[in-house]
Amino acid sequence: MTAPRDALDRKLLALLQMNARAPTSDLARRLGIARSTVHERIARLEREGVITGYTARLARAPNREMARALVMLAVEQQQVRETVKRLETFPEIRTCLTVSGEFDLFLVVEAERLDRLDEVLDDIAVTPGVRRSRSSIVLATKFDRAPVTEPAPQDTPAS
């Protein structure tokens, strides 16, 4: 993977992370450059492996707490890549990090109900490649410094 080349690449990537579906004309206007330049830069960033794909972020119901668990996984070393690919299929896994020490992966898992979270944790534990798991249920969030992004504008039909 190649790193972004300049500040313009970094600004473009930040805008795409907020809304990957933003029209190139909107991105161009916000960056103060030509639409064709935005298109060319996105194509280059994809070609160079800086952008490896696009994803949908699921909305959370306002004022509704999700059941959350922090999960540590010990994984068979020869199966780490395959295990991570299997874990990617769980929409409830919000974050997957590799870590050093006794465990190999650290997951943040969320579900709408505690019983659903329990089912997901059971499914994760029996995922091929997982040797051992340790889970902790999150009781409360005291603070969260994760960046807050604006919701993507909704497509509205033309009048």
Image (tube, rainbow, N blue to C red):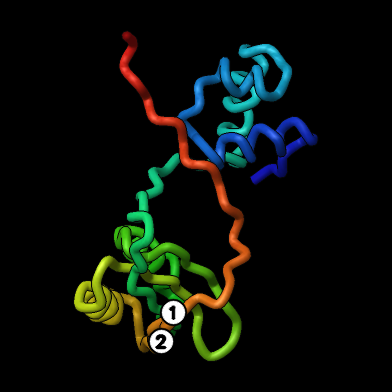
Q: Residues within 10 Å of mark 2 (few under 14, many from 20)?
A: few
Q: Residues within 10 Å of mark 1 (few under 14, many from 20)?
A: some
Residue type beneath disc 1: Leu
Q: Find residue 144 and report its horizontal and vertical position in percent.
A: 58, 68
Q: Residue at x 46, y 30 (%)?
A: 21
Q: Report the front residue among 83 and 71.
A: 71
Per the image, label 1 sits on a secondary structure element best described as strand
Number of numbered callouts drawn: 2
Q: Report the front residue among 94 and 36.
A: 94
Residue type beneath disc 2: Ser
Per the image, label 2 sits on a secondary structure element best described as strand
Residue sitting at the far front: 63
Relative horizontal placement of residue 130, taking residue 4 as reference (left or right): left
- In the displayed structure, 3 sits above or below 143; it is above
Q: Residue at x 59, y 61 (%)?
A: 146
For the residues bearing labels 1 and 2, Cβ distance under 8 angstroms: yes
Relative horizontal placement of residue 82, taking residue 17 as reference (left or right): left
- In the displayed structure, 135 sits above or below 14; it is below
Q: Find residue 20 and report its horizontal and vertical position in percent.
A: 49, 34
Residue sitting at the far top: 159
Q: Find residue 64 and report its horizontal and vertical position in percent.
A: 34, 63
Displayed quadrant of residue 111: bottom left
- Mark 1 and mark 2 lie on one chain; the one further toward the N terminus is 1
| Label of residue 70 in the image | 1
- Residue holding disc 2: 136
In what quadrant of the picture does the C terminus appear?
top left
Displayed quadrant of residue 145: bottom right
Residue sitting at the far right: 6
